[in-house]
Structure formats: structure tokens, C-alpha cells
Image: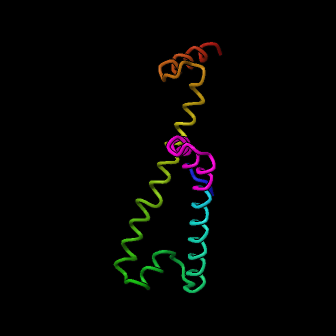
Amino acid sequence: MVGTGIFTTTGFLAGDLGSPPLVLWIWVVGAACAFFGAVCYSELGVNLPSSGGEYVYLTRAFGPTWGFMTGWASFFAGFSAPIAAAALAFSGCTAARCLAGTGGTAKTFRRKKRILGRQR
């Protein structure tokens, strides 16, 4: 799965590192970490075949308090934050495409939209 980070942070990463092969190696290392994390979760799923994911794993390992806490942390940081980041990235890319060739300001875009709306 490719997240919004590939669209929003690659330019900053390339600018800071200055080497395209180094940027690609960082993505390869990240992919390897994600793969090994997925393998670990699959092993947990095979060995603890219950519904609930992280909640079940942490409850059995450390007790119900940690399972409860990870549920709320996942709700706020694990699910809501990536959705908000994806919405910001989408709106930024959409605004950049809509404002392309208009001088780049929202005021120009609204004026252009208003003029085009009158022609119909």
C-alpha cells in the first residue's frame, strides 16, 4: 500500500539528501520494515486466532489496560490522523492542479470560476 507520504514528502527527502539512489534505498528499507512488520502480525494472527487485532495481542501479553489504551490510541492516532493527512494531501494536489496557469492564488481561481459560470 502506498500512502500519501510518497506524494507529499519525497521532494523534501530528495532535497535534503541530494542523491536519488539514496532516496530509493530509503524507500527500500522502509518497504522491508513494513514487510517484516506484516510477517510479525501474520504470525500473531496464526498463533492467537481471535478477532480484535492489536487489542487481543496486547491484552494477552500485558493485560486489559494496555489493550484498552491501544484501542483508543489506534482510534485517534492510527485511524483518524492518516485520514486527515490524506485529505490534506488530496486538497493540496487538487488545489495545485486547479490553480495551475492562473497565477496560483485562490482569489484568481474564484474569479475564473465565477467568469466561467456566467458563460454557461
Q: Could you tell me which residue is drawn at 59 percent across and 18 percent down?
A: 117
Across and down, in percent, residue 75 comes to: 43, 63
| Residue drawn at point x = 58 percent, y = 48 percent | 6
Up-down relation of residue 108 to residue 78 (above or below)? above
Q: Is residue 8 magenta?
A: yes
Whether residue 70 sits left or right of residue 15 in the image: it is: left
Vertical arrangement, residue 102 with respect to residue 66, above or below: above
Measuring 52% from the left and 38% from the top, which residue is drawn there? 91
**Image colouring:** rainbow
Q: Position of residue 70 (x, y in %)?
A: 40, 71
Q: Residue at x 47, y 80 (%)?
A: 56
Q: Residue furthest left?
A: 65
In magenta segment, residue 101: no
Q: Position of residue 57 (x, y in %)?
A: 47, 80
60 shown above or below 21? below
Viewport quadrant of the C terminus: top right
Q: Quadrant of the N terminus?
A: bottom right
Q: How many marks?
A: 0
Tell me which corner region of the image, top left, top right, bottom left or bottom right, holds residue 71: bottom left
Q: Which residues are magenta?
A: 5-26
In the image, taking residue 67 as reference, residue 83 lies left or right, namely right
- Secondary structure mostly seen in magenta is helix
User: Which residue is at the front of the view, 106 or 104?
Assistant: 104
Q: Quadrant of residue 49?
A: bottom right
Q: Position of residue 107 (x, y in %)?
A: 47, 19
